[in-house]
Image (cartoon, rainbow, N blue to C red):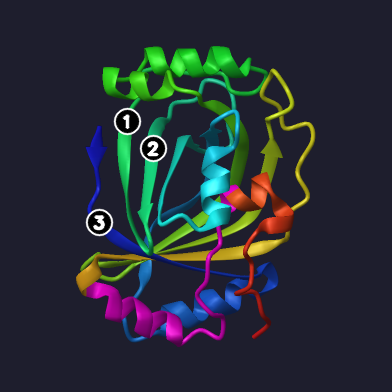
Amino acid sequence: MSRNDLRYELKLASEVHLYEEVRALLRLHSVGLSPIHHPRKVQSLYFDSSTDEALGDNLAGISHREKIRFRWYGVGTVGVRGRLEKKVRENMQGWKELGEVDGIFNIEGARREELKAEIAAATSPEWRELLSRDLEVVQWISYEREYLATSDGRVRVTLDRDLKTWDQRFSSRLSRRWRTPTPDLMILECKVAPEDLHRAEGLLESLPVSVDKCSKFVIASSPGDAPLRSMRTI
């Protein structure tokens, strides 16, 4: 299980029709953001306990929170290669622990428990033990993501849109047949190491949308409780 560095993750959400305007403001800022690779579709299966522990911790504002997901890129749902991620958050700081998965998986139509077992069998013993706990696939989430960064790579920004979610808690097989109604959003995330926080704050203060909590997992799992207070029109 590999871990990336401790970082701040600052988020904001806005109406999706402001995407191009916000993107232009980011590109014009003196911090010097530019694309680091082509935009792509991100797809994730999120795990939670049978009692929705991860969701409950987020809604309760617990300072230490963990989310586990299987993530892949592209539009495909059959013959998928991906990796496991555990996202850990301590207040406003956090990190990701990554797990390599040596296998190809058919997501659409798979039985939830069987897919979890297949993924567990194709990863390390450490991740296998983690997945053996009271965890099940609860949400399928996809969106389009664009990546920007400064020339030194120390300030990174992602812009997400076309968010789609499908609740899997009430079906034995993974399906995108019934989409969860969610707001049509643009979600911006700025990721920096603690020593570069001032650079991120200066960048985001130039945008007329305030930083706040905005969890795609919460939006998918409990849309009525989704913390979207940062939404406002430019």
> Which residue position holds label 1?
99
- Which residue type does callout 2 highlight? Glu
Task: Count how many numbered circles sit on residues in the image.
Answer: 3
Q: Give the range drawn in magenta.
A: 196-217
The magenta stretch spans residue 199 = yes
Whether tag 2 and tag 1 are in contact, CB under 8 A, the answer is yes
Left or right of 174 in this view: 88? left
Q: Could you tell me which secondary element the residue under label 3 belongs to?
A: loop
> Which residue position holds label 3?
6
Q: Could you tell me which secondary element the residue under label 2 belongs to?
A: strand
Question: Could you say which disc has been placed on residue 142 in the image?
Answer: none
In the image, residue 157 lies at what x, y percent?
40, 65
Q: Earlier in the sequence, mark 3 or mark 2?
A: 3
**CA–CA distance in space, label 2 to label 1:** 6 Å
For label 1, the crowd category at 10 Å Cα-Cα, with few meaning under 14, some 14 to 19 and many 20 or more, is: many
In the image, residue 211 lies at what x, y percent?
50, 75
Judge by depth and name the residue closer to the eye, 83 or 135: 135
> Does the rendering let one see residue 52?
yes
Is residue 4 depicted above or below 173 in this figure?
A: below
In the image, residue 231 lies at what x, y percent?
65, 74
Question: Could you say which disc has been placed on residue 85 in the image?
Answer: 2
Whether tag 1 and tag 3 are in contact, CB under 8 A, the answer is no
Q: Could you tell me which secondary element the residue under label 1 belongs to?
A: strand
Quadrant in the rendering for residue 27: bottom left
